[in-house]
Image (tube, rainbow, N blue to C red):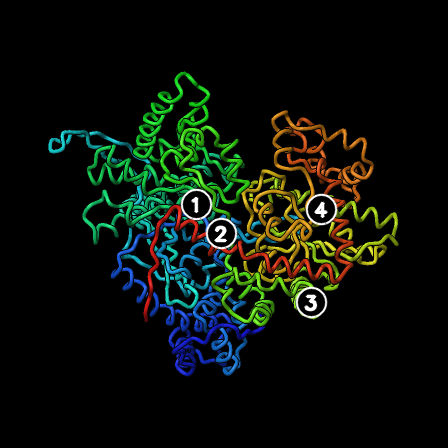
Amino acid sequence: MNHETFAINPTSEGFDREAFKKEILSNLKVLYRKTLDTAAKQEVFQAVSLAVKDLIVDRWIATQKAYQKKDPKFVYYLSMEFLMGRALGNNLINLCCYKEVAEVLNEMGLDINVIEDQEPDAALGNGGLGRLAACFIESLSTLNYPVYGCGIRYKYGMFKQEIRDGYQVEVPDNWLENGNPFEMKRPEYVQTVKFGGYVRIEWDNERQRNRFIHDGYDAVHAIPYDIPVVGYGNNMVNALRIWDAQPVQEFNLASFDKGDYLQAVEQENLAKNIVEVLYPNDNHYSGKELRLKQQYFFVSASVQLAIQKYKETHSDLHKLPEKVCFQLNDTHPTVTVPELMRILLDEEGMEWDEAWEITTKCCAYTNHTIMAEALEKWPVDLFMRLLPRIYQIVQEINRRFLIQVEEKYPNQYNKIRSMAILYEGQVRMANMAIVAGFSVNGVARLHTEILKKRELRDFYEMMPEKFNNKTNGITQRRFLLHGNPLLAQWVSEKIGTDAWITDLSFIKNLEKYADDPKAQKEFMDIKYRNKLRLAEYVKAHNHIDIDPNSIFDVQVKRLHEYKRQLLNILHVMYLYNQLKANPNMDFYPTTFIFGAKAAAGYKRAKETIKLINSVADTINNDPSINSKIKVVFIENYRVSNAEIIFAASDVSEQISTASKEASGTGNMKFMLNGAVTLGTMDGANVEIVEEVGSENAFIFGMSSEEVMAYEANGGYHPSEIYHNDMDIKKILDQLVDGTFSHGDREMFREIYSSFLSPSYGRADQYFILKDFQSYAEAQARVNKAYQDKSRWAKMAILNTAKSGKFTSDRTIEEYVRDIWHLEKVQVEL
């Protein structure tokens, strides 16, 4: 990645250039028996990273000493995903010595950009959920708050995406192939996690009650690896604690000697499978089983260690809520609730009521979506077989809660149907998180209102005090200071301070430059240089020439039908048809850029990727349109190429079906980098438009209320639009007439049928055709506005200037104030 070195960081006090050089050379010698002139690029990256790690460890030790002295409350941020991105550059920025290290490396004949490019993105997450978790723990560290991020050390992550003949192909993302130089293995904190078996009951004479004993189980060891999370300029280093699985007994020699070779390695395979991949395909029973194992594995290990650490310095577990909060990042970690109950009941000998009081004061739940697949439900038979004791506890939580529901709403069986944790053979995890959590928050104001009024209405009516909103945010240190150094330096020069790095509200001081012709030119020159950088990336990876003077219209995010990448590419087909019919029409050249992974088992999403690439292949090779449209699909979208993309974007496509996107954070990253939002009034788009003004965004489509009204009445009839709108009819027909598929009429038949055939479920359930003309009109407004250079520059500057609200620092301070109640800890070296 071609970063231009910037000089706005405060100088790192005590940074010894000569000692740093010597340590790099020593690392090369000790690790590889190499000198600088014989070492490979990857070896140099490892040596530099270990030298940086040495700087970090001093601060890490100091942080732990500060914690021991102050005994603060910790938040354990439990998440199945942490989409961290590359660590080296971000660590240098937060250590405030990026400039110094770049200069030292230059003196050694090394380019910091080349070295950063040797680092693979940590394959610990996929989409916005994981990136938000990464932003949050970085903000917690920068704001001097104690946190452990808790997750899984996936060996391959989700997958590395390759595009072959236009199709997504999933290949293993072996990000740990060369090791992770920043992680630290912590075998002293090993925990045992148990699956399967049965529960037997014994009478405990001493306590005069039954004891529940888990027997006949399979077990794995959970080994934590800590990755440092460095705060900006404050000496604080927290830990992302990711758990690896190892067999309790690696090799059963007795079984091997008897010839039972599979039995000999059974435990090893159990452990290996748990940490192999992020989100195994759960379209089948074994996939569901593995996903549930993953969730219990990291939750059980994290909760056990949290209790263990608490007991090292505290004797009264009843005061656990004063020192520990478990934040459940979506429903995935909800087994925290019964696991904490299990430990308090079975291991600590508490009575139910006292254990429940502690648990319900320690657990808080963040809901990230109203999409059904994310409100997890597990088949009872699977849950009971895999986690027998946990299931018994869930049964009792459900029994006691339904008594409360019946007392409050006698004979209202619809309430039980809505709120029961166990219902119709399923364990409903979101319901359990709400029942047990002391806080339930949505992640954008609109999303929270939809939860309260529709999706979780019965819970809100029964326990309104639990519900609150925490609009998401992003870290400006990753997505401006590191990702867009040219703009970062310009911001500091214009507003006369670097204070925005830790207080993004200062960026509002750019507003006065929005009408300044000189500032407009400077801003757009920076945008152009960033577009050149992205064009070089596209040329190298896609072998496509794109014009940096064209509009860069970008949609990068997880591929899901509700995010409507399909609406975007259908509109590109529509524009292509218009240009073919009228080559001289007034149209400013536009490059449409896509980037997205589709889940391995998500057929429609993968078909959409093929369609995007097929349309790209046709349009990019048609000289008759004179390159007025180019279409690019960026392979293997991830944090490191996202930083290049956001910095270069003119238009931010945020076009989800209104009411479906909880928040979005890509919209904030685009805004921070001076891209203008083209979107629906959905998720955080609503708040972005409030900040920047509707005149500085392009809004289209139905409102969330209109969408929900249609849904309440069974949808709408897209066939009516198809038969009455000839433009739409033409693009849908092109899906099955071979225009974009080299004559193959069946390649996109299922996409075509999803709009028109009832046999494919409710037709067009994400209202693509319903919103199409509104979207096309908004796109036309974008194209016209961009041709007014002064107007566009003003809009772009104002988007950056008005982005202050959308920092994760603000979000974290709200979590601390309303939910976690943490104290700041100062760290001295």
> On the image, numbered disc 4 is attached to which residue?
569
- Front-lying residue, 337 or 299: 337
In the picture of the structure, the residue carrying the numbered disc 2 is 132
Which dot marks residue 516? Answer: 3
Is residue 597 visible in the rendered structure shown here?
yes
Q: Position of residue 348 (x, y in %)?
A: 21, 40
Asked whether disc 1 touches disc 2, contact meaning CB atoms under 8 Å apart, the reply is yes
Q: CA distance from mark 1 to mark 3?
A: 43 Å
Between disc 4 and disc 2, the foreground one is 2
Residue 329, labelled with which disc? 1
Please name the amino acid that badge 4 sits on. Ile
Point out the tag, 4 or 3, that comes first from the N-terminus: 3
Label 4 – label 1 distance at C-alpha: 32 Å
In this rendering, the label closer to the viewer, 1 or 3: 3
- Examine the image and state in which quarter residue 385 appears: top left
Nearer the N terminus, badge 4 or badge 1?
Answer: 1
Q: Residues within 10 Å of mark 2 (few under 14, many from 20)?
A: many
Q: Rate crowding at label 3 as few (under 14), some (14 to 19) or many (20 or more) other CA atoms within 10 Å.
A: some
Judging depth in this view, the residue of 810 and 680 nearest the camera is 810
Specify the amino acid type for callout 3.
Answer: Asp
Of marks 4 and 1, the one in the foreground: 1
